[in-house]
Amino acid sequence: ALYFLVLLQNIHILFKEIESSNGPIESSMKGWSPGPQPTKSSITNTPKSAVKKKPKCYYTYEWDNLPQDVQKAATNIGYTKNIWDEDKDLPGVDKVKWDAFGVEIMQTLKKFGFTKETWDCGKCGGCPGPNLIFIMTDQHRYDALSINGNTVLETPNIDRIGNEGVNFELCYSQCPVCGPARTSIMTGRTIDHTGVPKNPKVSDYFNHTEIPCYDKVLTNLGYEIEYYGKWHAPIEQALAYNNWITPIGNVGWKHGPGMERQYTDYLKDHMPPTHVSGKKEYDGLQIQSLDLRPYKTNPLDARHGLKADTDEEVGQPDQHGISTIPSKNTLTAFQAKQFINALQLKARKKKPFSLHLSFHSPHAPMTPSEPFASMYNSSNMHSPPSISDPMDNSPYKGANRRKKYTEYADPQKIKYMIANYYALVKEIDEWVGQILAKLDELELRENTMVIFTSDHGEMLGSHGMREKNIFYEESVRVPLMIRFPGEITPGTVVAGKPVSHIDLFATILDYLGAGKHDSDGESLRKFIGEDGEDYETFAVSEWNMKEKNTPNLMIRNKRWKFMCPCHANSKVMNVLYDLQNDPYEMNNLLGHNPKKKMYAQQGQVMKEQLILWLKKMGSRHLKEVMKRKII
């Protein structure tokens, strides 16, 4: 009787946090103050779209919003409205084993999502989630994965996410450049609606928007949210997280250092700076601009053959070679270790979590470390089929400084870049494997949604250029895989159906039981289910950085891709590609094509689809596009 009296007085301790995880444990973070801490949020309505087959966590609910059976169960073990809503404690029973409870107590604990396994293991929370892990790479083209057909690069760990879930073969960035793309992913909004059409705008966006990111919405369901790695989105959105956020750059802000600053501070304790200038033994080495450590150049590097640590300034995209940083201390390793540490801490809590990991790689500089650098020999690489495309009928003939940086159209030199790029992806794959293994070890696999994607692609010598910023497949098409046991059938492939990054916001909230929230996208669930074959779709991408001298809009369906500027009288040519017969986009059927009249009707069909989308989005470009002629 005394035992049950104690039990009736204090079972609420089950829902208290076990320990705090306020950011990374790296020694380089000492002295920085953590960001704002989240407060307990109430839910005004029980979500109608609760995840099927998965128990709910009711800890964050107010008493009046508890389902009747759960409220009754809570009453049976001593709760009242006052005790529950005021979060009052009762004596703890967290050290009592499951088998020591009576049947009534077991049934009550089951109402709150516990099982014998999750109770006794001590590391699985009573709030079973579902949890979210979102892994993003930077500048990762769709075909730089073995699951997407690459026969040189093997990525078994990233592939596992798609093989154990769904792989979207045709996913498109809403805008093929970092800041705008990431902002659209997080908010489910077009760049017109986010107000972030180019990278510098992420800094101008402070305290100017009421558009929430998906993680902000999840906090209202009691989720703990943390973000690790590269932050290249509006600073305001970073304030939603309760850990250090690292925007790109060497400068710090009141909630922590920039990404480069954080990493170079870490390197000071693991690999002090090396001064290579004027030393013969360091011939062939240059200082990399991001990590400030030496790397051995290759013939594609802009400083190859110059004296060590030359004063010549070179941007990240033109730095190519092999880093001297040990693999255990690379930026990729640093970011992954922070994430794994956070995952371990979250696993010991009784709250659902959303953890985001944003790798900097395989974004330039292209300077992988050993042993990854030696895994791919440049002589075994294949130059892109379109590398020598004259582009006489393309609006991108001068894009990405293509005419200036002609080395990226060199069929032999480009192989160095491809080899290094693959090495960077391979390193990421190794760490993704460790993350998935840790998820299994912590017994969180079955109750965690895992997403893998990238913000945009990389030209990698296609059409004789580097970087992104354009609507060619290599730049705008990205990998997308989602794994969610019990919700998504393993081995699902969504083929022939273009989807957009702006759909991820709605998809995440749908699968996590958060219901519908305003966004420009739609949940991808309809493509994943049994009736997915009945849906036809298209994807739209935008580019508004240089409105008057480049295509601003792209629409792609299963077979065709259409591009146009957003001004009716622009001299920028329209573009139509038949991707079924021209997968490398070397034959524009409009523009200067003497047979363009034959394809005007198909161009008009694509334009009409684009107009429908612009109307739906309330786009400011609608009227101009409607007035624009196909030929």
Image (cartoon, grey):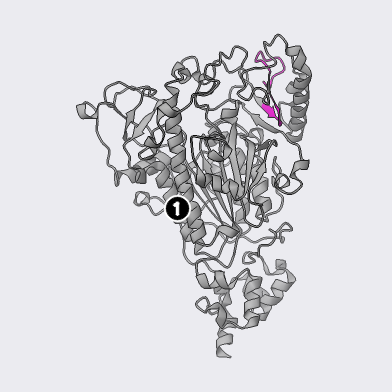
Toward the bottom, the furthest residue is 1
Mark 1 burial class by Cα count in 10 Å: few <14, some 14-19, many 20+: some
Q: At which x and y percent is residue 258? A: 43, 41
Q: Is residue 607 above or below residue 369?
A: above
| Quarter of the image where the N terminus is located | bottom right
Specify whether residue 105 is painted magenta. Answer: no
Residue 200 at what x, y percent from top left? 52, 31
Amino acid type, mark 1: Pro
Seen at 67% across and 80% down, the residue is 76
Residue 572 sits inside the magenta stretch: yes
Across and down, in percent, residue 154 comes to: 49, 40
Viewer-closest of 348 and 237: 348
- In the image, residue 241 sits, relative to residue 382, either above or below, namely below
Is 530 drawn above or below residue 172 in the view shown? below
Q: In which quadrant of the rendered image does the C terminus lie?
A: top right
Instruction: Report which quarter residue 612 is drawn in.
Output: top right
Circle count: 1
Q: Is residue 629 visible?
A: no
Front residue of 370 and 323: 370
Q: Is residue 572 above or below residue 152?
A: above
Q: Please identify the quarter of the rendering in which residue 613 is found.
A: top right
The answer to whether 336 appears left or right of 551 in the picture is left
- Which residue is disc 1 drawn over? 34
Give the secondary structure at mark 1.
Answer: loop
488 sits left or right of 232 in the view: right
Task: Tell me, yes or no, if residue 128 can be seen here.
Answer: yes
Give percent across and percent down for residue 2. Answer: 56, 90
Q: Which residues are magenta?
A: 554-575
